[in-house]
Image (cartoon, rainbow, N blue to C red):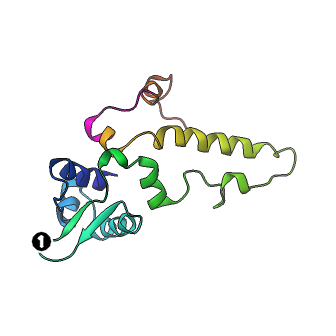
Amino acid sequence: MRALLHIAKAYEADPKQLVKADEIARAQDLPIKFLEGILTALRTAGIIISQRGAEGGYRLAHAPKDITVAKVVRALDGPLAAVRGERPEEVEYAAPADHLKDVWIATRAALRNVLENVTLHDILVGELPKAVKPLLKEPGAWTRRI
């Protein structure tokens, strides 16, 4: 996300501006090989566009307001909520755990509620959607649990 936000900031200044991987790696303190793998996955998913050559680099394929965090997570990690590598609706449990599937479906719905409504632009400007903001003020939201 940090690398993508770096590219998004450049896009908002000039949608045609290309950003080099080594610039992103330095600015975000990321190992270049790790970053290159991420950039490849984002390019394959159609989130960014790359151009080769001395003047090459990366830019967003769409405006930051059109790229949700969910789209990025899915491109890099697969489904938002998976249970042992399967989609929650595909898992089956025997009693007494037969309703555990409902917990996984609800978890996915909660993740979607946030990640599908927050865009790169929202993060860049520091203004989360109205539906998401209250979650930051919920009791215990900022407290780590073991």
In magenta stretch: residue 9: no
- Left or right position of 1 against 80: left
User: In the depicted view, which residue is nearer to us: 32 or 146?
Assistant: 32
State whether the magenta stretch is mostly helix, strand or loop: loop
- Left or right position of 107 against 74: right
Q: What's the residue at 29%, 65% (across, down)? A: 49
- Residue 57 in the image: state x and y as whole percent: 20, 67
Q: Is residue 2 above or below residue 102?
A: below
Query: Residue 123 is drawn in which quadrant?
Result: top left
User: In the depicted view, which residue is nearer to us: 67 or 144?
Assistant: 67
In the image as oriented, which residue stretches furthest toward the bottom? Answer: 53
Q: What's the residue at 31%, 62% (across, down)? A: 48
- Residue 135 in the image: state x and y as whole percent: 47, 28
Query: Residue 121 is drawn in which quadrant?
Result: top left
Which residue is denoted by mark 1 in the rendering?
A: 55
Query: Residue 56 is drawn in which quadrant?
Result: bottom left
Q: Residues within 10 Å of mark 1 (few under 14, many from 20)?
A: few
Q: What's the residue at 59%, 51% (across, down)? A: 81
Work out which quarter of the rendered image holds the C terminus and state it: top right
User: In the rendered picture of this protein, how many numbered marks are placed on residues?
Assistant: 1
In the image as oriented, which residue stretches furthest toward the right? Answer: 95
Amino acid type of disc 1?
A: Glu
In magenta stretch: residue 125: yes
Residue stretch rendered in magenta on the structure? 123-130
- Residue 60 in the image: state x and y as whole percent: 28, 57
- Residue 27 in the image: state x and y as whole percent: 19, 55
Q: Is residue 117 above or below residue 86?
A: above
- Left or right position of 40 against 137: left
Identify the secondary structure beneath mark 1. Answer: loop
